[in-house]
Image: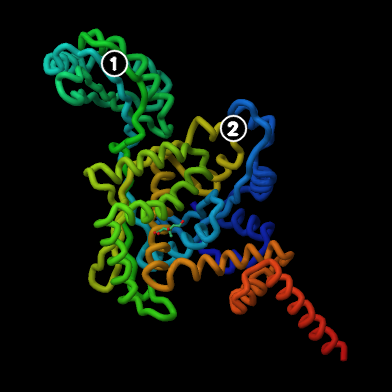
Amino acid sequence: MAKSSRLPGFYKVTVAERRALVSDATGADARDIERALDGGGLDADTADKFVENVLGTYALPYGVALNVRVNGHDRVVPMVVEEPSVVAAASNAAKMVRAGGGFQVEVDPPLMISQIQLTDVADTHGARERLLAHKDEILAMADVAVPGLVASGGGARGMEVRVLGAESDRMMCVHVIVDCKDAMGANLVNTVAEAVADRLAEIARAKVGLRILSNLCDKRCVRVRVVVPASALATDDMDGDEVIDGIVNASRFAELDPYRAETHNKGIMNGIDAVVIASGNDWRAVEAGAHAFAARTGQYSPLATWRREGACLVGRLELPLALGTVGGTLRVHPAARLSLRMLGITDASDLAAVAASVGLASNLAAVRALATDGIQRGHMGLHARAVAVAAGATGKLVQRVASLIVEARDITVEGAKKALEVLASEEADGASAVED
Ligand code: MEV
């Protein structure tokens, strides 16, 4: 946890100064930050142990979302993402949410689903009865396969038997439900599937098919709720009440139209994926689970919705989120370990609560921008900063050059070079005036 996640003026200072501020706010050692992040945190030799045929590594920007308060605790949240404006937008929206008390989050226990497909089943009804009668035996077999997990308090918790398709498909699927504690759980759950499959097939008088986890881990959901006062949502041109109406309208659009729901959800995943990557977790699994969950009723729907309640805007987000704070990439990636230290994460559900909160913040930022100025204005401001840097601006000059090229409607490297020259000659004039 952070002393405070409010660090005003953070974006204006240098990278080295930001590292010092974050170290002070979170207690993460300044040298650890340097060691873990310089050069992307991963050398080619370490990368060679991750995957095959390695040539090198591919770095992405590592930023932090500010102003985030989750269940009463401040968090400085690491985000790894290449898209400009995602980190700033999440931080701005988190500030609005903070005005209403922050993110209120509930996290389900870390239950994952191990799927065992059974094929060539002669009598699915009879097989189902027999399988359920052997539930205790199967759960005990599952526990034997993952002794480390059982020793840490996890293990098999339940079993479901599903008949798939028509009787002529002769296909069933058994779910073994496993409490994975602080692990994401893929390896554990795959081990369980392989350990119990033969016995299940014997009981069902069937053949073993696939044995693998399901990323639609809908027993491991996170629910976030925020209440944002109208005053925190106002823009230069619109009062807070009008903005609430605009955001509720944006929500209804996504609820009624899958083409919009998908983009609405992409905005949520901008925030979630960035935290998932920064913490060394499997973002493809998270993405697959989120979109399958969004389509669970048969109509692809928004994962987050917004409503007016009196003078406030109330937002709700629900999605499955399988994140780990032990094992996998975390064992070997120094930047992923740093992220958890910086966050002051105590367990996997804590991490899921933070990631989902940043997802809802990202969504709020996007729908507020869309319902007010449009998305391009904010994007342009940030794009202008990147262009200013490309033209050679550093430190405080970055923002000054960005403002000038936005004002001149000339957001090009050439335009930024001209702005730099203007600022340099103004400075020279100022200096000679002092000398005179
Ligand atoms: C862009 O990365 C994300 C948005 O398209 C999300 C949205 O439309 O809600 C701005």
User: Badge 1 is on which residue?
Assistant: 140
Taking 240 as reference, is 136 left or right?
Answer: left
Residue type for callout 2: Val
Residue at screen point 65% across, 64% down: 387
The amino acid beneath tag 1 is: Ala
Q: Nearer the viewer, residue 190 or 225?
A: 190
Q: Quadrant of the C terminus?
A: bottom right
Q: Residues within 10 Å of mark 2 (few under 14, many from 20)?
A: some
Q: Measuring 79% from the left and 80% from the top, which residue is drawn there?
A: 425
Res. 4 in view = no
Q: Looking at this rendering, what residue extends furthest in the bottom direction? A: 436
The foreground one among 418 and 293 is 418
Q: Earlier in the sequence, mark 1 or mark 2?
A: 1
**Residue shown at the point (54%, 35%) measured from the top left:** 330
Residue at (23, 13) in percent of width and height: 120
Answer whether labels 1 and 2 touch (C-beta < 8 Å).
no
Would you call the spot at circle 1 few (<14 residues within 10 Å), some (14-19), or many (20 or more)? some
Taking the image as shown, residue 424 lies to the left or right of residue 27, namely right
In the depicted structure, whether residue 79 falls above or below residue 239: above
Q: Is mark 2 within 8 Å of ligand 1?
A: no
Residue 157 position within the rendered picture, expressed as x and y whole percent measured from the top left: 27, 26
Residue 393, by quadrant, is: bottom right
Q: Percent x, y for residue 244?
A: 31, 71
Q: Secondary structure at mark 2?
A: loop
Relative to 322, is 152 above or below? above
Q: Real-space Cα distance between discs 1 and 2?
A: 32 Å
Residue 358, quarter of picture: bottom left
Could you tell me if residue 383 is visible in this image? Answer: yes
Q: Quadrant of ligand 1?
A: bottom left
| Quadrant of res 84 | bottom right
Total tally of numbered discs in the picture: 2
**Residue with the mark numbered 2:** 332
